[in-house]
Image: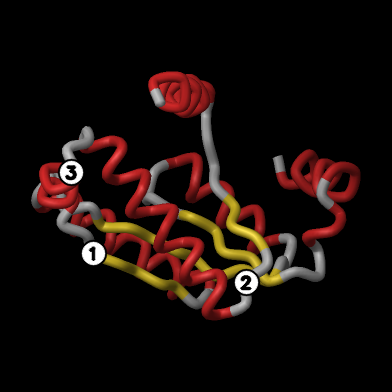
Amino acid sequence: MLDLFSKYIDKELAFIKDKKLLVAISGGLDSVVLAHLCAQLQLNISLVHCNFNLRGNESDEDESFVLQLAEDLELEVFVESFETETYAQEHKISIQMAARELRYVWFEELASQLHYDYILTAHHADDNLETFLINLSR
């Protein structure tokens, strides 16, 4: 997998090799694999994690996992906790839209303030479909 990822970076994304990158990490398999691959290629990455406080203890466990992963990989990590349900109610939007808005606004602010060049996210096919449907509904 590392070899395929390395070849893909070389062919399609060579411009990120000397850039400062934020890797969005939920604690799920996709984003953890992305973090490991980027770290193994020695890309200049930091991790960024959102705790949306939507799953009780599980949300906190995800956060703890991400903090431990960052320590294990010797990476800087940024974590933000959000009151997602309150935000959704105040803005009269779905929980999913609230989480998306909170996440991307914070990522952009962090990238701008700390001079990161790109934000990397890991998505599987279901995520892409969800994004398409959310954009379609706008």
Give the residue drawn at x 85%, y 43%.
12
Callout 2: SS: loop
| Disc number for residue 116 | 2
- Spot occupied by residue 21 in the image (x, y as percentages of width and height): 64, 65
- Spot occupied by residue 115 in the image (x, y as percentages of width and height): 62, 77
Which label sits in the foreground, 3 or 1?
A: 3
For the residue marked with disc 2, what is the amino acid? Tyr
Quadrant that contains the C terminus: top left
Q: Residue furthest right?
A: 11
Image height check: is 98 above or below 19?
Answer: above
| Neighbourhood count class around disc 2 (C-alpha, 10 Å): few under 14, some 14–19, many 20 upward | some
For disc 3, the marked residue is 88
For the residue marked with disc 1, what is the amino acid? Ser
Q: Is residue 110 left or right of residue 95?
A: right
| Neighbourhood count class around disc 1 (C-alpha, 10 Å): few under 14, some 14–19, many 20 upward | some
Which label sits in the foreground, 2 or 3?
A: 3
Callout 3: SS: helix
Q: CA distance from mark 2 to mark 1?
A: 21 Å
Quadrant that contains the N terminus: top right
Q: Which picture quadrant has residue 111?
A: bottom right
For disc 1, the marked residue is 81
Q: Is residue 4 left or right of residue 115?
A: right
Give the residue drawn at x 47%, y 69%.
109
